[in-house]
Image (cartoon, rainbow, N blue to C red):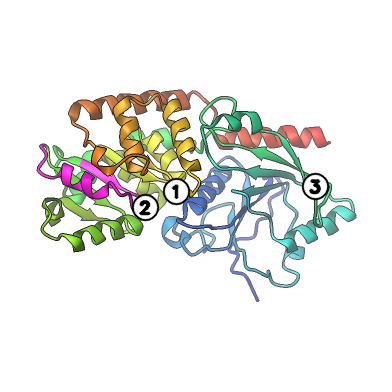
Amino acid sequence: MVHPTGITLANNDRPLWDVFCHVVDNLGDIGVCWRLAANLAARGQQVRLWIDQPEPLRWMAPGALEGTHPWIEVIPWTTPLPPGFCETLAPAQVWVETFGCHPPEEAQAALAAQLAVGAAPPVWINLEYLSAESYVERSHGLPSPVMSGALKGLGKWFFFPGFTAATGGLLREPDLEARRGSFSAAAWRARMQIPLDALAVSLFCYEPQALERALLQSAHRHPPVHWLITPGRAAAAVQTLCMQDASAAWASGEHMHHLPLQDQAGFDELLWACDLNFVRGEDSLVRALWAGKPFVWQLYPQEDGAHLNKLRAFLDWLQAPDDLRQFHFVWNGAAPAERLLWPDATRLAEWQATVESARARLLGLPSLPEQLLRFVEQAAMHKS
């Protein structure tokens, strides 16, 4: 079995990173991991990105699987891996396991064999989920010994993304502000045939119970509301409601725009062009913050309600006004759908100011890739 691993990474001037990504669902994990790999490559590193479901990269990052992105190699992470595959790879200086996944057993065994003949161990990072909860600051940067397996006795480091100076920061590209500054929302809307005086609303969600009420309340508004609906679960949720009541006022095709799949740059532009963004998961929350537009965040629901603690902590950090907090609670199923109140112009202006203030605070902090690079350098110096 041969892996289509694209380019061969062999540049001693660029430190080599192995980033391991196990796709759980909804593709937020692969979105974060690709942005991280691209960001590291832009900052002088070379990356092998191990992914067990790489196909979404065909539309998310065209050319990724063919190896056309400089200094990034995508490795399909099969179970098992081809015999002897890991032994053919140059050892990496850094391992990053993302969202609680563990590097493949074959890679761990190959590393153990290399260590047995004197190779230096990589700096091993456990990149965790994003949260504003208080435990993040307490846990960020703590060591985590490996207690079992072929690499028993080695150490990892917890690295927590976050929103404060005491955390690992957020993903942000070096050219993000330049791209955003040169973007023309008017030209984008013209291509999409959305009037400049309309209220453009992007919809990237799961299946919120309050969706129908939001659609109903947004109908017959002035200026008119145009919904830009992303494919997948958001489009399916809208379609289900439309099938239940095709005569609903909001179901007019004139104001409902079903979008094709967007690559990551295209998704950023969608958020920049809209007046209100509904986002979900981790990656799109960060992109909504960098967009600087009013947004509503839907978290992946957990049976024990832990996502609501995460939501409260984030809204506290955001310094969200009461009406924005209430909208979030309704949208995330923590309050009845009947309590949803569509924002008028005054409320949207307040939400805009809230997001702009949060964005300014974040821009004053180093990004996650910057902090990772600094952390790895310090950890490597400590080992030597």
Residue at the (79%, 60%) spot, across then down: 110
Amino acid tagged 2: Tyr
Camera-nearest residue between 375 and 295:
295
Q: Which residue, given by chain and number where applicable, does mark 2 sit on?
A: 206
Viewed as shown, does residue 228 lie left or right of 48? Answer: left
Q: Quadrant of residue 285?
A: top left
Q: Mark 3 or mark 1, which is nearer to you?
A: 1
Residue type indicated by callout 1: Tyr
- Give the quarter of the figure containing the C terminus: top right
Res. 348 image quadrant: top left
**Which residue does the image show at 62% across and 64% down from the upper left?**
77
The x and y percentages for residue 161 are 56, 36
217 versus 28 height, above or below = above
Residue for point 48% across, 65% down: 55
Q: Secondary structure at mark 2?
A: loop
SS at mark 3 in the image: loop
Q: Residues within 10 Å of mark 1 (few under 14, many from 20)?
A: some
Query: What amino acid is at disc 3?
Result: Pro
Q: Is residue 295 left or right of residue 36?
A: left
Task: Give whichever of 7, 141 is nearer the camera.
Answer: 141
Near-viewer residue (321 or 85)? 321
For residue 300, the mark is: 1
